[in-house]
Amino acid sequence: MRKQIYCFLSLLWISCLSVSAADRWVINPAGGITWQIDERVPHEDHIEMSGLKVSTVLRYGVDANGAFMLNRSMIWPMLRTIPNNTHASLMRRFAWDVTDMVEVNGQSLQNEKVKDVTLNGTMVVQSEYALPRKGKLCLTRVLFPSVSNPAFCEKYVLRNTGESVVSVEIPSSRSVVETDAAKGVDGSYKLVSTINGQTARQLQPGEELTFSATFAGYKKNESELSFDIDRELQARQDLIAGFWDNLILDTPDPVINTMFAFAKIRGAESIYDTKGGLMHGPGGESYYAAIWANDQAEYINPFFPYLGYEVGNRSALCSYEHFARFMNPEYKPIPSSIIAEGIDIWAGAGDRGDAAMVAYGASRYALSKGDKAEAEKLWPLIEWCLEYCRRNLNERGVVASDADELEGRFPAGKANLCTSSLYYDALISAGYLGKDLGKPVAAYARQATALKKNIDRYF
């Protein structure tokens, strides 16, 4: 058996080396990742990027001829659809190729060759176009969500890198979709796609021109916005720099370091400015304008103080305040999820050990944040959740629950290790927190000691 395991690990190591040698993406000097386009096309991929009022999954790639492919899956979390459930964010896909509208020397742009694609909190695509008489154009696309507006933004820079003058015409264009009023919580929504160009120029060798496109969504009573593409881009770059430059993981493995850097972006950008306050969401074209006892209360919230991201900290406090609404003197379970901008709940898996998740996360968040006033606000919720868990100890001294965080994907029995472990850590963490706040916490230490023994015996 030992020899078989050794052989398996050796094969796995060889396989990893083989995959690494064939990687499409490389870490660039600025810390982002770049796909240098080679003969391995066609190839497609996807990435999600978010702002406070919009999220976009970009399905992108390079076709067999070397041209860029793009389909934007737009999500507006606050444009609610019917039924107004967990998945009721308005979603639409836009495959509009903005460059099809550009005229060069009286013809549409053709024979694009993508040189590279870079991800760094934005998507930057570099392409070349060969023209007659030693003409050449380079096109840079910069794609990103607005930080604070309900729009996805695209900046285009066209450069004449050839030896001859090029005649360029960029249109202005506006496309409007008004959605079915019967399918919207607030009636019909207006989706506006624009190209902001309206220029005709003789582009000398070495010269460049810039134009932009936006994809925005509005409620009927909202006024359309006018977007300054450079200001929007600067806001996005400033946001990413704040993530990039704080809480830096420095290990001997640059891949792990880069993975952590990108995880910071995705973990922190996915916060939505809902009518129920700032609500972090997993995204994935399914989960927006809602919070979960695991995803937010347990996982991401204790992370934000380490990142120093104030919007993240505010979203964390907001989520705990939402869960605190469901404390009750009968000690009935709190919901697993609070959905639809905070006006409804989901509890489809029963009690997953949600109180243990909240007690653990809120204690860890308060300890990490170090704000006494916030900790005092959170203390009643932590106390209630710990008492809920204590009241649900079974005859063998571990916590009973209907499921665990996998929500029935695998059998969890009537008591599971996940819930009891979270309760154990919550008792320890609440002990540290309560001591700093001057609360009577000696019982938590005794309960933790007993629980540790019971976990060992039961599991």
Image (cartoon, grey):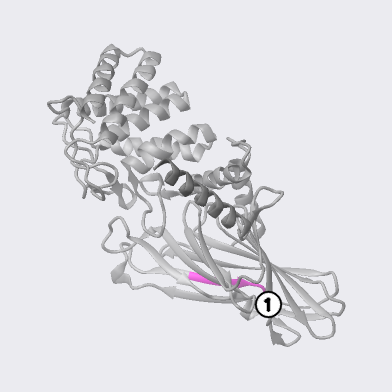
Q: Is residue 112 left or right of residue 59?
A: right
Return the x and y of residue 287 as percentages of the image width and height. Answer: 36, 54
Q: Nearer the viewer, residue 335 or 150?
A: 335
> What residue range appears in magenta?
192-197
| Residue displayed at 63% across by 57% down | 21
| Residue displayed at 62% across by 35% down | 250
| Residue displayed at 49% across by 59% down | 150
Residue 196 on the magenta segment = yes
Number of other residues with Cα within 10 Å of mark 1, as a class: few under 14, some 14 to 19, many 20 or more:
some
Q: Nearer the viewer, residue 36 or 204?
A: 36
Return the x and y of residue 114 as percentages of the image width and height. Answer: 67, 71
Q: Is residue 233 left or right of residue 410?
A: right
**Residue 285 position by quadrant:** bottom left
Find disc 1 in the rendering and name its residue: 112
Vertical placement of residue 292 versus 415, above or below = below
Magenta highlight: main SS: strand
Vertical placement of residue 179 versus 341, above or below = below
For the C terminus, the image quarter is top left
Q: Amino acid at mark 1?
A: Glu
Q: Nearer the viewer, residue 35 or 339?
A: 35
Residue 324 visible within the image: no
Q: Is residue 110 left or right of residue 357?
A: right
For the N terminus, the image quarter is top left
Return the x and y of residue 173 as percentages of the image width and height. Answer: 59, 77
Q: Is residue 127 left or right of residue 452?
A: right
SS for dot 1: strand
Residue 419 on the magenta segment = no
Return the x and y of residue 90 as percentages of the image width and height. Answer: 38, 64
